[in-house]
Image (cartoon, rainbow, N blue to C red):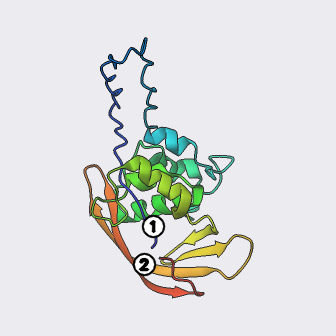
């Protein structure tokens, strides 16, 4: 599966503190201990911040999507949340580089609800990406009409083409689904 992913919103909404149960009373237990304070669930941003990203040391380094532009002039605005992809190509580029740099939020933000990887619980989604979905065994070598991944630690490159479907979302283009149409070098990434 190529560029799996999620959809944004990062809302968060406050996790209200669970109301304290009415004190225990009864059975002569003196001053009931306050119920163990429930830790509020972490926000999506907090979970994402713990990701080991692979951002370039300098924003002027060539962007991982292969456009030839520096990262700051290319995909960074889409990753920083200030820009929404204005075309399917832009969406694909930004997703490719987000995988390369290990950035879950842009992936989540550009996944259409219709995508099979879409999850309402974005925190759980981000955690799942961290554990299993970021293709950590590969470098994202280049994006052209086919995507080419090179196993870290050596081995044959894997190239594949994907028929991708993008849908226009509220503010930009979102990745809806993809189907691998051809691959070379073995492994089907799915
Ligand atoms: Zn780029």
- Residue 15: % across, % down: 35, 32
183 versus 109 height, above or below: below
Contact (Cβ within 8 Å) of mark 2 with mark 1: yes
Residue where numbered disc 2 is placed: 162
Q: Is label 2 within 8 A of ligand 1 (CB to nearest ligand atom)?
A: no
The correct choice, above or below, for 36 with respect to 101 in the image is above
Q: Nearer the viewer, residue 47 or 66?
A: 47
Along the viewing direction, whichever of 123 and 8 lies nearer the viewer: 123
* Above or below for 38 versus 181: above
Residue 105 coordinates in the image, percent (x, y): 45, 49
Residue 173, placed above or below residue 34: below
In the rendered image, is residue 63 in sight?
no
What x and y, as percent, mark residue 2?
46, 71
Image quadrant assignment for residue 9? top left
Give the residue number, with chain letter if any, for mark 1.
3
Q: Quadrant of the N terminus?
A: bottom left
């Amino acid at each position: 599966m190529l560029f799996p992913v999620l959809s944004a919103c990062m809302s968060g909404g406050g996790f209200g503190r669970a109301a304290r149960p009415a004190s225990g009373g009864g059975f002569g237990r003196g001053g009931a201990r306050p119920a163990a304070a429930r830790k509020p669930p972490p926000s999506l941003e907090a979970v994402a911040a713990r990701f080991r990203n692979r951002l370039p040391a300098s924003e002027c380094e060539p962007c991982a999507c292969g456009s030839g532009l520096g990262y700051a002039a290319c995909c960074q605005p889409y990753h920083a949340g200030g820009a929404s992809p204005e075309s399917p190509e832009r969406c694909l580029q930004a997703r490719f580089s987000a995988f390369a740099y290990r950035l879950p939020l842009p992936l989540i933000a550009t996944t259409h609800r219709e995508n099979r990887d879409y999850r309402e619980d974005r925190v759980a989604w981000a955690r799942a990406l961290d554990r299993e979905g970021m293709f950590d065994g590969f470098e994202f070598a280049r994006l052209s009409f086919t995507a080419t991944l090179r196993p870290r630690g050596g081995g044959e490159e894997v190239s594949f083409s994907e028929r991708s479907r993008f849908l226009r979302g509220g503010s930009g283009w979102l990745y809806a689904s993809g189907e691998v149409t051809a691959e070379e070098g073995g492994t089907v990434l799915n």
